[in-house]
Image (tube, helix red, strand yellow):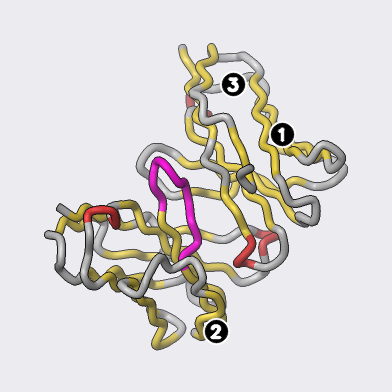
């Protein structure tokens, strides 16, 4: 298995632009998570899905952020409009057997908003 | 008080040394605990779960102290390859209540 695949690896965009991050979870995993990591706040859960359904989006910072999972093999996280404070590393992770087994992270998207 | 607190370090230790990290948590109802490892500019990876009775995996030992609300990670005979950031993870019930610590950076020096 190729693991959790995220794209792009790096994204540099101007303030006000729309940014779309993509994730392909591990086949068969029924949970998908979006995290954001910064030096100051560490890893923060933004939203997670179970069987393609959003379960908890309380971590989404504001209405500028939205996430979708149209099918079991694809999810997007969109920021519109982007702001410099959104600069961070965004990780997608997937899992299938509960936290006792942990879950697998993708390699992340490093977003810089200038 | 933060839900999960870790000393960010860095901890600089010589090869072969034993080093220990602690992580405190505020929610006494927390149920599951983990240590993840994150290499520089890489994604976090599960290192080990932490069981109530303590558990060991090779040179790594994890322990839980519910009374004092902390978990620990002990690394014996440190290797250069152990250099990384170690993240403490606490599950207080459900995925939305999983909290990652800020991480403790370990640098093993030749």
Assess disc 3: are there few (<14), some (14-19) or many (≥20) residues with their C-alpha within 10 Å of its C-alpha: many
Q: Is residue A99 left or right of residue A73?
A: right
Assess disc 2: are there few (<14), some (14-19) or many (≥20) residues with their C-alpha within 10 Å of its C-alpha: some
Q: Is residue B88 left or right of residue B83?
A: right
Write the residue at 87% across / 40% down: B67
What's the chain of the residue with tag 1? B
Report helix, strand or loop for mark 3.
loop
Answer with the quarter of the image where residue A70 lies: bottom left
Which is the main secondary structure of the residues drawn in magenta? strand
Locate residue A77, reporting x and y percent.
Answer: 34, 72
What's the chain of the residue with tag 3? B
In the rendered structure, which disc, 3 or 1, sits on the residue that comes first in sequence? 1
Locate residue B4, reporting x and y percent.
Answer: 63, 44
Q: Does the magenta portion include A40? A: yes
Identify whether B96 is placed above or below A49: above
Q: Nearer the viewer, residue A14 or A89?
A: A14
Q: In the drawing, what numbered circle is on residue A51? A: 2
Write the residue at 35% across / 75% down: A63
Q: Which residue is mark 3?
A: B78
Q: In the drawing, what numbered circle is on residue A66? A: none
Assess disc 1: are there few (<14), some (14-19) or many (≥20) residues with their C-alpha within 10 Å of its C-alpha: some
Locate residue A33, reporting x and y percent.
Answer: 49, 68
Magenta part of the chain:
A37-46
Q: Which residue is mark 1?
A: B72
Identify whether A112 is placed above or below A5: above
Locate residue A95, reporting x and y percent.
Answer: 57, 68
Furthest residue to the front? B1
């Amino acid at each position: 298995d190729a693991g959790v695949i995220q794209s792009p690896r790096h994204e540099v965009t101007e303030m006000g632009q729309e940014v779309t991050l993509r994730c392909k979870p591990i086949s068969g995993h029924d949970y998908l998570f979006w995290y954001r990591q910064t030096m100051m706040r560490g890893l923060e859960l933004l939203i997670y899905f179970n069987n393609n359904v959003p379960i908890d989006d309380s971590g989404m910072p504001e209405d500028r952020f939205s996430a979708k999972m149209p099918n079991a093999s694809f999810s997007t996280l969109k920021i519109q409009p982007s702001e410099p404070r959104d600069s961070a590393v965004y990780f997608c992770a997937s899992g299938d057997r509960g936290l006792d087994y942990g879950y697998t992270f993708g390699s992340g998207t490093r977003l810089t908003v200038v | 008080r933060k839900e999960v607190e870790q000393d960010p370090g860095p901890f600089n230790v010589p090869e072969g040394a034993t080093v220990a990290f602690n992580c405190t948590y505020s929610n006494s109802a927390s149920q599951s605990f983990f240590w993840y490892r994150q290499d520089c500019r890489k994604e976090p990876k599960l290192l080990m779960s932490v069981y109530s009775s303590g558990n060991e995996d090779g040179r790594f030992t994890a322990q839980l102290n519910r009374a004092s609300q902390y978990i620990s990670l002990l690394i014996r005979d440190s290797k250069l390859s152990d250099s990384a950031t170690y993240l403490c993870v606490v599950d207080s019930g459900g995925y939305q209540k999983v909290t990652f610590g800020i991480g403790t950076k370990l640098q093993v020096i030749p």
